[in-house]
Image: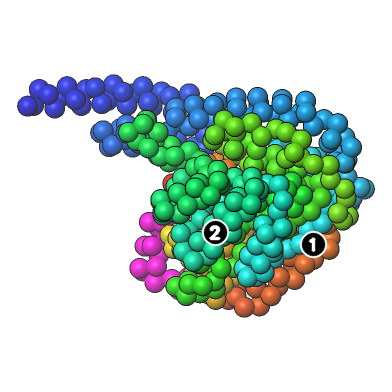
């Protein structure tokens, strides 16, 4: 018995040594590298298990596979729609303030997605208005409905939306529904079967099926996209379910920021859906019928920025650094999960020291309480630099919004944490429009008025139990 145990340990540490070499040959954030090395050396068996199924080799393989598929589809899109883009998508937007122009240049370089003008954007903060507008668009669909969600719950709201989509499929409208496998783990077979029987194509992004060799629990698709007839699109932070409609009282009213977009930017959202659908199902949707010619619907400049682990750069990290560094007067941030790295904390501090008013609102009634305690671990560093931190007590604040100088704004699905920066497929919409930025800033001030401003003394008065929670949560932050 002891001989076998010694052999197992020898094999474990031989493989662990190979894994450590792999970690060292793929440089990444030092804390994550150290965490992997310690896990491999101090957790025999378990460390190797986690490394093989969650670590860099598997992540790199998935990245390469996704990049190859995206490159193939991009060539097809470029060949078929080059003339369409030239006709109705303005790749160089109308003249803007020089600072914003530099941000456009950076966002375009890191994402390869250009801004478009001629858009009309309607912003929703009320869930009922969001669902009402979405249902109206779906009911009016005549050709196709493409929907992509991280969470679709099998409750009254999810059932009603499923029945609406199924009814349109029976009318002959081509309906496709792309759902994240992990986010939609609670979706019932009955609902899925009902949709498929009605003619809806339902697919799950990166399913976790161990007996088929699929263990990809990372790389979740956190995007929320709806495209109707290639002419109207919805995106933002709203999922499908009763709690996202504010019908559950556990966390109080649930608050999202969502948008309806008409105009050339709809094509960009359609392209993101087409890429994700192709990767999941191998079906090629690059066809004229899904990309109709679009006229200008308004005068707003919009840039659709998809981000994810298949990118060559950490797009959201780059964008946020650029925003923080370019701000002249103010930066307003709403995020439900605030798990920044050291570099992001330094960026916020530097902006505050420059005299920029930096304000952050976080919810205290959170569906992932560990993230609140992680955030509180950074309060002291932020407050001492002059950053204003507010805690919102009136419900789950799920919006992901950044407003700079009341002139430029970002709305999307990405949280301010490592998972959104490095592991999730996210979608952010940049609004280069002062009117929309002021509208979002007005909503920010409304939320701020309902929030408690955190003071340095509040941090000093944390109890022993609270400081222990903060310490434990911060240790786990690299995994969040």
Q: Residue furthest left?
A: 1
Residue that sits furthest to the right in the current view: 95
Q: Position of residue 383 (x, y in %)?
A: 59, 65
Image spot of residue 19 (x, y percent): 37, 26
Q: In the drawing, what numbered circle is on residue 163?
A: 2
Q: Position of residue 255 (x, y in %)?
A: 59, 68
Q: Between 71 and 309, which is closer to the camera in this rendering?
A: 71
Q: How far separated are the C-alphas under marks 1 and 2?
A: 34 Å
Task: Residue 258: tell me if it is visible.
Answer: no
Q: Sequence order check: which comes first, mark 1 or mark 2?
A: 2
Compared to 230, does 242 lie above or below?
Answer: below
Q: Is residue 50 left or right of residue 274?
A: left
Residue at image position (87%, 41%) is 88
Q: Is most of the magenta stretch helix, strand or loop?
A: helix
Residue 149 placed where, x, y %? Answer: 56, 51
Asked if residue 8 lies left or right of residue 366, the reply is: left
- How many numbered callouts? 2
Q: Residue at x 45, y 49 (%)?
A: 193
User: Which structural element holds mark 1?
Assistant: helix
- The circle drawn on residue 350 is none
Q: Residues within 10 Å of mark 2 (few under 14, many from 20)?
A: some
Q: Residue 63 lies in what quarter of the image?
A: top right
Question: Relative to residue 229, is residue 48 depicted above or below?
Answer: above
At horizontal 50% and vertical 46% (from top left) the residue drawn is 196
Is any part of residue 167 visible from this angle? yes
Q: Residue at x 81, y 50 (%)?
A: 263
Q: Which residue is mark 1?
A: 436
Magenta highlight range: 458-476
Among the 4 quarters of the image, the one containing residue 360: bottom right
Q: Where does the N terminus fall, quadrant-wise?
A: top left
On the picture, is 342 further left or further right than 92? left
Between 363 and 470, which is closer to the camera in this rendering? Answer: 363
């Amino acid at each position: 018995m002891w001989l076998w145990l010694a052999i197992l340990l020898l094999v474990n540490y031989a493989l662990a040594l190979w894994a450590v070499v792999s970690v060292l040959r793929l440089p990444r954030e030092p804390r994550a590298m150290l965490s992997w090395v310690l896990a491999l050396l101090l957790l025999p068996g378990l460390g190797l298990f986690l490394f093989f199924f969650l670590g860099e080799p598997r992540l790199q393989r998935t990245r390469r596979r996704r990049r190859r598929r995206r490159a193939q589809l991009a060539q097809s899109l470029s060949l078929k729609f080059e003339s369409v883009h030239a006709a109705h998508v303005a790749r160089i937007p109308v003249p803007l303030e020089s600072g914003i122009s530099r941000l456009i240049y950076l966002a375009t370089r890191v994402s390869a997605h250009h801004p478009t003008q001629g858009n009309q954007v309607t912003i929703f903060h009320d869930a009922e208005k969001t669902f009402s507008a979405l249902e109206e668009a779906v009911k009016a669909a005549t050709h196709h409905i493409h929907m992509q969600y991280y969470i679709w719950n099998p409750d009254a709201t999810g059932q009603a939306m499923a029945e609406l989509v199924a009814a349109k499929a029976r009318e002959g409208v081509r309906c496709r529904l792309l759902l994240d496998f992990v986010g939609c783990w609670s979706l019932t077979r009955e609902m899925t079967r009902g949709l498929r029987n009605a003619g809806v194509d339902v697919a799950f992004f990166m399913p976790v099926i161990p007996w088929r060799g699929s263990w990809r629990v990372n790389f979740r698709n956190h995007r929320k996209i709806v495209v109707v007839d290639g002419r109207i699109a919805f995106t933002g932070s709203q999922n499908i379910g009763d709690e996202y409609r504010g019908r559950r009282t556990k966390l109080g009213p649930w608050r999202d920021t969502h948008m309806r977009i008409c105009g050339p930017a709809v094509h960009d959202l359609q392209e993101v859906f087409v890429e994700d659908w192709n990767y999941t199902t191998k079906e090629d949707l690059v066809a004229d019928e899904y990309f109709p010619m679009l006229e200008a619907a308004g005068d707003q400049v919009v840039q659709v920025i998809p981000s994810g682990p298949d990118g060559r750069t950490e797009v959201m990290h780059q964008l946020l650094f650029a925003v923080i560094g370019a701000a002249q007067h103010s930066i307003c941030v709403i995020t439900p999960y605030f798990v920044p790295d050291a570099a992001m904390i330094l960026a916020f501090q530097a902006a505050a020291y420059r005299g920029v008013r930096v304000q952050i609102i976080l919810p205290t009634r959170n569906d992932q309480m560990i993230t609140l305690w992680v955030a509180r671990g950074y309060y002291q560093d932020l407050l001492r630099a002059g950053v204003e931190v507010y805690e919102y007590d009136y419900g789950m604040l799920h919006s992901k919004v950044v407003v700079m100088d009341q002139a430029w704004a970002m709305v999307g699905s990405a949280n301010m944490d490592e998972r959104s920066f490095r592991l999730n497929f996210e979608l952010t919409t940049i609004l280069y429009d002062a009117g929309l930025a002021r509208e979002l800033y007005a909503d920010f001030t409304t939320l701020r008025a309902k929030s408690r401003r955190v003071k340095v003394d509040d941090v000093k008065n944390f109890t022993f139990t609270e400081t222990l929670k903060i310490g434990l949560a911060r240790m786990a932050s690299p995994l969040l």
